[in-house]
Amino acid sequence: MSEALTTGASPLQREQAVTVFEKGAPGRRAFACPELDVPEADPAALLPAGLRRSEPARLPEISEPELVRHYVRLSKRNFDLDSGFYPLGSCTMKHNPRLHERVAALPGHARLHPLQDPDRAQGALELMWRLERSLSEIAGLPHVSLQPSAGSHGELAGVLLTRAYHEDRGETRHKVLTPDTAHGTNPATVTMAGYEVVKVGTNADGGVDIDDLRAKADEDVACLMLTNPNTLGIFDQNIEEIARIVHGVGATLYYDGANLNAVMGRSRPGDMGFDIVHFNLHKSFTQPHGGGGPGSGPIAVSDRMEPYLMKPVIRRVQGSNGHAPRFELDHDRPKSIGRLRGFQGNYGTFVRAYAYIRSLGAEGLQDASETAVLNANYLLARLRALVGAELPAAFGTLCMHEFVLSGAPMKKELGIRTLDLAKRLLDHGFHPPTVYFPLLVDEAMLIEPTETETKETLDAFAEAVAAIVAEAREDPAIARNAPYTTPVRRLDEAGAAKRPVIRQPL
Amino acid sequence: MADASYPDGLLYHPEHDWARVEGDVATFGITWYAQDSLGEVVFFEPPEVGTQTKQGEPYAEVESVKAVSDVIAPLSGEIVEVNAGLGDKPEVINEDPYGEGWMVKVKLSDAGEADGLLDQAAYTATLS
């Protein structure tokens, strides 16, 4: 303790993080139950012996103030969007308007039971149906399913739909193409769905290498999975040619919607020739995310993919005799790939996304995307002016909603890596950008500021990066040993991967 | 972690792999530059003995804290031995990439292929 005090460690650095199971004392309670006002039931009479515990579960026994402080302390160990700028590339960490929380917390939304009869959940079904229509308009594709619960889940849905589509035509295909800039989930999804991944190269402008695509596109290819703009923050202007090549061999074209925030209301994947699109409601349409969920990855598809869409689908049935329309769950879909999950999806994310779309409107969504692109280009220009040679842009001087810098010159000239810069940014109060992705850029740093940040924040971030680079010119050891102000310093990432502690003895 | 080094006498593939040829058998591994770029290696997925390697094609995978990467074969042949020690201690790929961190031994099928690889001077020139 005394050594920690002299080195200036903060209380959170000195304090060992503990689980709630390690706190408290026997008999302590955070809640006093009222007197039982019904006859006490004997568990032995209600449950078979095999399902009964011989001794009580060892649940935490703590007071309410202990409980509150425990979770508040844990929350302070995290860096969160409500505390500071979070330019994590490809994650679209935009502000979550508090209005959405208020709407999602309305009892009719928050307390709706998953087993509620559809007749008694007409409002929820209508909201979902209206969200589907909005997403359809944004995608430029007619049919939507809200079932997938994450972007990767939407990808899996899209690839399974592709398989069903080809099988229905009596075709068996084995390969799926992904660009070498793709999100890691794309090849993972392809493998999980039983296809072989074939990588397509990137051209000098950062787009798909058309000659390589032509060489690899054949009758054994089921699908090309693409992000546009891609993970380099570049809009592929050859998209129509790409669609022609892919459709020419009978394959489907899949749009990974991770980067939709760049183009909402400006261009539509359906118009570019995509057959299947997934949305990340938790990225483009504001949801608290970054803690592992809940997420939402709806998909929109073209007419030819519709018969295979997941079931049930929501149908709007016109009312008669002056009655309002009704909303029903249609399970009668013989060619459907079936269900991808229980119940209808993460409903709270639907409420927030719908609130976002309705409060911004079509023009507002377009504004959001344009401001996201403007902010990214402003930050890129500021960094170029303030830092320059040590941290060049990987491709070109303009970008869409995000951009990639290469820390390779910085590593060579100053002896600090992208990881060191990222860690040092934490001491300046900023969450680091995505690092070492995309893989084709050496010492990559992927920065996505989003539209909800002010010019002052973008300036402060650029100045912090410049200050870290200037500091490294004098003494690279400072960044190499950063961070200094966080609850923990450098983590043993290799140890965590090789020897993960996933069970704690109680 | 050891300082950068590229021993003389090895043959290098531009994808940052090395081969030590002794008669008709060669030992393969990855270079200091490769392990430095990967960061701390946490897992090595070995191929099976008897598998064929083809020059320029992947024959194994390494996983680091950053990413999973293919390991490219500098020469073609049949794998006759795999470094079993990497299963428990993949970190020796970082600590000793040319010694304890070797990956496989291969009985070469095409002696002429070695002419296409780089010597120490030519390989280090590609890194600058």
Image (cartoon, coloured by chain):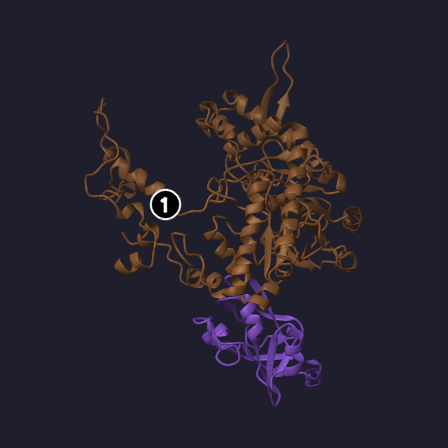
Chain colours: A brown, B purple
Output the chain of dot 1. Answer: A
Q: Secondary structure at mark 1?
A: helix
Residue A498 visible at all: yes
Q: Quadrant of the N terminus of chain A?
A: bottom left
Q: Residue at x 70, y 82 (%)?
A: B113
Residue A300 visible at all: no
Image quadrant where residue A274 sits: top right
Horizontal and vertical percent position of residue B51: 59, 75
Identity of the amino acid at label 1? Answer: Leu
Q: How many marks?
A: 1
Image quadrant where residue B61 sits: bottom right
Horizontal and vertical percent position of residue A5: 29, 56
Q: Residues within 10 Å of mark 1 (few under 14, many from 20)?
A: few
Horizontal and vertical percent position of residue A92: 58, 43
- Reply above or below: A417 against A458: below
- Reply above or below: A384 against B17: above
Horizontal and vertical percent position of residue A457: 55, 43
| Horizontal side of residue A257 vs A101, given as left or right | right
In terms of depth relative to the viewer, which is nearer, A246 or A416?
A: A416
Q: Residue at x 58, y 32 (%)?
A: A312
In terms of depth relative to the viewer, which is nearer, A276 or A362?
A: A362
- Reply above or below: A389 against A152: below
In terms of depth relative to the viewer, which is nearer, A439 or A189?
A: A439
Label 1 sits on residue: A74
| Horizontal side of residue A164 vs B82, given as left or right | right
Q: Residue furthest left?
A: A27
Q: Residue furthest bottom?
A: B23
Q: Residue at x 42, y 47 (%)?
A: A78
